[in-house]
Image (tube, rainbow, N blue to C red):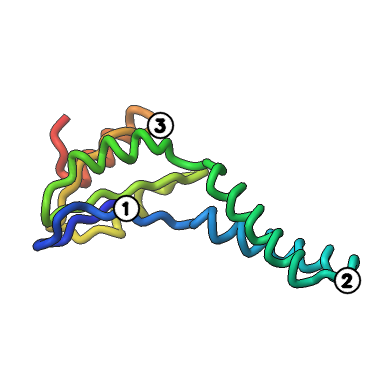
Amino acid sequence: MVSWPQGRKRPKTYQAVNTVGVGALGGAFWGMLFGLIFFVPLFGLLMGAAIGAISGRFTDYGINDDFIRDVQSKVTEGTSALFLLTGQVTIDKVEAAFAPEERGELIQSNLSTEQEAKLREDFGAEM
């Protein structure tokens, strides 16, 4: 999600999963486990956390970062952008998640032409 609240200098991007944090936590667990086996648990924990954080930093999956940056550059103060990456989509549930007076713009999708037209119609976007 990209959000730019009123009065802020620039937009802020929030991601659902912090790969650095997840990598550090997993690395700390495995590092401590192997550290216990070799009688150096603190060293194993620290090294595992560091290696896990580094690997998490270079892990990339999900929505393309360039696409997120491109959309972020188009967000104006007082607006936001929501990115959805799903395996299966039920358009009725997406439609119900937004209030009727709220309108959005569909930028990119891999929906069928009929599904995309229905989604655009529901959000009031012109075709």
In 3D space, how far apart are the residues under numbered discs 3 and 2 (Cα atoms)? 52 Å
Q: How many marks?
A: 3
- Name which of mark 1 and mark 2 comes first in the sequence: 1
Residue 125, given in percent of the width and then of the height, sits at 16, 39
Q: Are marks 3 and 2 in contact (CB under 8 Å)?
A: no
- What's the amino acid at mark 3? Asn
Q: Which residue is drawn at 52% across and 43% down?
A: 87
Front one among 61 and 37 = 37
Q: Which of marks 1 and 2 is in front?
A: 2
91 shown above or below 47: above
Compared across the picture, whether 31 is left or right of 124 comes to right
Categorize mark 3 by other alpha carbons within 10 Å: few (<14), some (14-19), many (20+): few
- Quarter of image, res 127: top left
Q: Distance between the residues labelled 3 and 1?
A: 23 Å
Q: What element carries label 2?
A: loop
Where does label 2 land, which residue? 39
Q: Is mark 3 on a helix, strand or loop?
A: loop
Q: Percent from the top left, x then y, of residue 51?
A: 66, 53
x, y percentage for residue 18?
Answer: 49, 57
Q: Is residue 124 above or below residue 101?
A: above
The x, y position of residue 124, in whole percent, is 15, 43
Residue 29's place in the image compared with 15, above or below, is below
Q: Which mark is residue 13?
A: 1
